[in-house]
Amino acid sequence: MSFAQANPGTPGTPRETTQDLVARLNPQQKQQYDDARKAFAEHRYADSLAIHRLLLKDFPGDPILLKFASETALQGGDPAFAASMLKSLAQTDPDDWQAAALLTRACAEAGDKPGRDAGIAHMLDLHSRGVTPPQLQQYVVESVKVGEKTLLINTSLVPWGFYKIYALGKVIDSTGKLLLSITLESNDLDQPGFAKKHPDEAAKGMRRFSFDTYTETGIDNTGRRTQSQALYKFIDGEPPPYEAIREEFVKLAAGQGSPIGIRTNLTVP
């Protein structure tokens, strides 16, 4: 599984881990569990989900199985089923960041915008309280079909990287090959100009943001990755809400819009 892994919880809040679950399984159940993981890895999501549902009959309400089954349902294109499994788990244990992140995605892909936005806010709260792992910078909010391609939209818990990325879109083909990266970023190099033009706003912590795209351009003669960057739009002030980011990302993934600036063969920082 790619997401619902061991989650021992915060101090004072014990939580079942994958190892705890496996220790409770008899040999037949352990084989089912292994078969479900193998089917997931092979992208046989319907098979994986069917096995998880059998295990949930033996262990109703088990949080690890619910999260595994929910992630499998999401990958298989059934966000409504995933949301139905996750809501009670998220209510029972609001500090389970995995359940919160998965439920946020399930709501997004099921068209529940209020649930999606509440989930994004809750994940930020969990991050501010130190509940999410320190290394968790971002998580997937939504998978969107754009023609024959798929757009995976990640939102950041904290701006990260050289360009201070607030949201990242990955456009992939049917084989999973990355075709294009899309960012909402707030590069530190853009801030002096913003502060000069908007000193009062800058003093209040506001920033300049931009929508950019990146395509891979291979390896240079020093062995480092290179990219081409296209700048599409500046936004001054506050980062836009998720719905506005999603709308812009979908347009860019579909090849709509004209860049206002292009830089080629940039070394990836």
Image: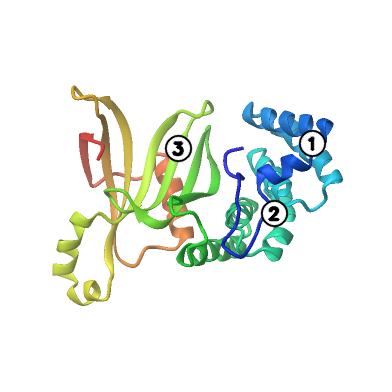
State which quadrant residue 91 falls in.
bottom right
Numbered label attached to residue 83: 2
In this rendering, which labeled residue sits more in front, label 3 or label 1?
1
Depth check, front residue: 208 or 36: 36
Numbered label attached to residue 103: none
Q: Residue 25 at x, y = what percent?
A: 79, 39
Q: Residue 103 at x, y = what percent?
A: 63, 55
Numbered label attached to residue 50: 1
Kind of residue at badge 1 = Ala
Residue 78 seen in the figure? no
In the picture of the structure, the residue carrying the numbered disc 3 is 171
Q: CA distance from mark 2 to mark 1?
A: 17 Å
What residue sits 52% from the left and 64% below the top? 126
Number of other residues with Cα within 10 Å of mark 2, as a class: few under 14, some 14 to 19, many 20 or more:
many
Q: Earlier in the sequence, mark 3 or mark 2?
A: 2
State which quadrant residue 201 falls in.
bottom left
State which quadrant residue 239 falls in.
bottom left
Depth check, front residue: 13 or 79: 13
* Side of 176 where 33 appears, left or right: right
* Side of 9 where 218 appears, left or right: left
Q: CA distance from mark 3 to mark 2?
A: 25 Å
What residue sits 41% from the left and 32% below the top? 179
* Side of 199 where 133 appears, left or right: right
Residue 179 seen in the figure? yes
